[in-house]
Amino acid sequence: MNLANFEHSVDGRIVSRGLEYYEDDCVISLRETKTNRYRAEVEGSEDYEVEIQLSEGGTVVDWDCTCPYDMGPVCKHQVAVLYEIRDMLETQGGGSRQPAGTGKQTDLKTLLSGCRQEELVDLLMILARDEGVEERIRLHLGRDDTDSAVEQSRRLIQSHIDQQRQRDGFVTYARVSTAVRGAEMVLEKAQRELQKGAAMQAVRLALCIMEELIEFIQECDDSGGHISPLIDMSLEVIVEAVLDEDLDGSVERHAFFELLLEEAAKEQYDGWPDWRIEILGVCAKLVDGPDRQEAFEAVLEELGENEGTTEWSQKYWNEHTDLMRLEIMTRLQGVGQAEVFVQGRLEHTGFREMAIEQAMKRGDYEEAIRLALDGEQLDTERGHPGTVNRWKERRYEAYRASGQLEEQRKLAEELLLGGDYDYYLELKSTYTPAEWKRVYPDLLPGLEHSGRSYYFDPYPKVLIEEGETARLLEYVSRQPSLVEEFYPQLVSEYPEEVYKLFKDYIMKTAERASNRSNYRNVCRIIHLLAKAGGVEAARHCMGTLKALYPRRSALQDELSSVKWS
């Protein structure tokens, strides 16, 4: 989830409660402990500590709260803090507030820079009385060989996990974020090693993290999603290290190939095909001759015998490994043999796409149409309507490119009635204005009675394009909430009808409202009504609501705050 719109990823009830905490100033303190990592204290039945970690792009990559809530991945205290962080960062964007703690960090760096070496050593020895601090110091400053560093890192990861285990060995939801602290430390070390150019050390550490966390994920409740991002970031270290163009010649490339091929074959990846496929994908890029190609193929064959306990998972495995084979074949045997390989794997969606693309490039449009039609039949039998539509789109491109106008029009109409508005524009562009006047009325009944929900319905967009405001008003009248979306197209011609739709919508929304967030939404719609020109209608709604709900103090408060010019 992303800080900009995290509300869409969290249960609505939790969002409402968290918003109330935020609005009631229950977030007592908030500080940025290091770049993009925040710690807050939230007042509730007790005071709870919340930690939030963001990526550079604003993705919430880690979160934790000391409260006992275990009914979902995110609690109301974390939601309140996310609102507070977003508010703080927006304020910073305006230049009026600095990140919490920034000044202190700058002063601390200056202070430490002025210390003598023996003073710093004494300070670190004092801090190292805390076992966790000692572990970080040893990990950061360790000068051991790679094998020793990996084993030390493995012990560190296991130690943090073991500290959080219950008597039965299981780690509960509330303890997982603390249990993976050791893995986080090792990941930081792997990233530092990568920056220093120690590619093999970085990869070995990253694999250590993956091995330990894949085992741990089966011994804990990670519904909060703490483990997968760490494994994914470890894979990023591996990819960056191994695929670096400055890699030290064939010897180091061979060492990486052997290491990763052996890793991918380990039993612990059974049941985790995505991560195994990621590792094999890196291996595939290191195959640069027949010997490695043969070794790689042998591992794929061996793993393929046991990979995929269902038809879907077997298909998933086969398609991804065949893509690796194709990549290697293109590089070593040439494009011609690779194209033959593609033609023999048309059951894979990606391969059929390639075959159609190849046919289109050489101008063989009938072959492209045949491939698309076969794909439609195959995926209809499989029960994959989305992919069926994909093949229809490819067929449409072939009709258009080959000048088969009637077939193009027929398929454009089918895709439009299937819910794709873009094909309305495509279809209309194939007719002259005079021709379109004759064709258009015959399209309307199928669009109007499609039964699609608004979000997937091209009908209102078509009405707007054609200037059919009377039909649009009738459409909105059946779903009054849509007045928010379509009042700009209607209000100049049908002001009274639009205001009435707004009023009915406001009253029904208020009737269902039960908290301050809901009341604020009611006031937002009232403000929209006034913006549409219905100031008197908006005032009437406010007066009616105040009279109807005198005991809803939060609603009365929100209504009093509504202002318009």
Image (cartoon, rainbow, N blue to C red):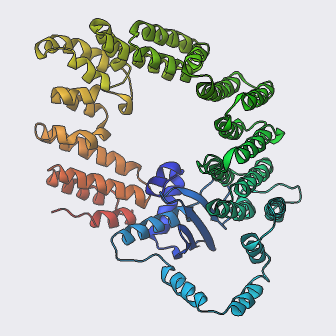
Describe residue 461's horizontal placement relative to residue 290 as left or right: left
Describe residue 74's horizontal placement relative to residue 301 as left or right: left
Residue 359 image-quadrant placement: top left
**Looking at the picture, does residue 404 appear above or below residue 337?**
above
Residue 405 image-quadrant placement: top left
Residue 253 position in % (x across, y down): 70, 44
Residue 293 position in % (x across, y down): 72, 29
Describe residue 332's horizontal placement relative to residue 419 as left or right: right
- Considering every residue shown, the one lying at the far right of the view is 167
Identify which residue is drawn at 17% across, 49% down: 532
Describe residue 83's horizontal placement relative to residue 311 as left or right: left
Q: Quadrant of the C terminus?
A: bottom left
**Looking at the picture, does residue 412 appear above or below residue 20?**
above
Identify which residue is drawn at 22% across, 19% down: 428
Residue 165 position in % (x across, y down): 83, 60
Number of labels in the image equals 0
Identify which residue is drawn at 50% across, 12% down: 376
Pick the front one: 547 or 207: 207
Residue 111 position in % (x across, y down): 57, 90
Identify which residue is drawn at 72% across, 56% down: 173
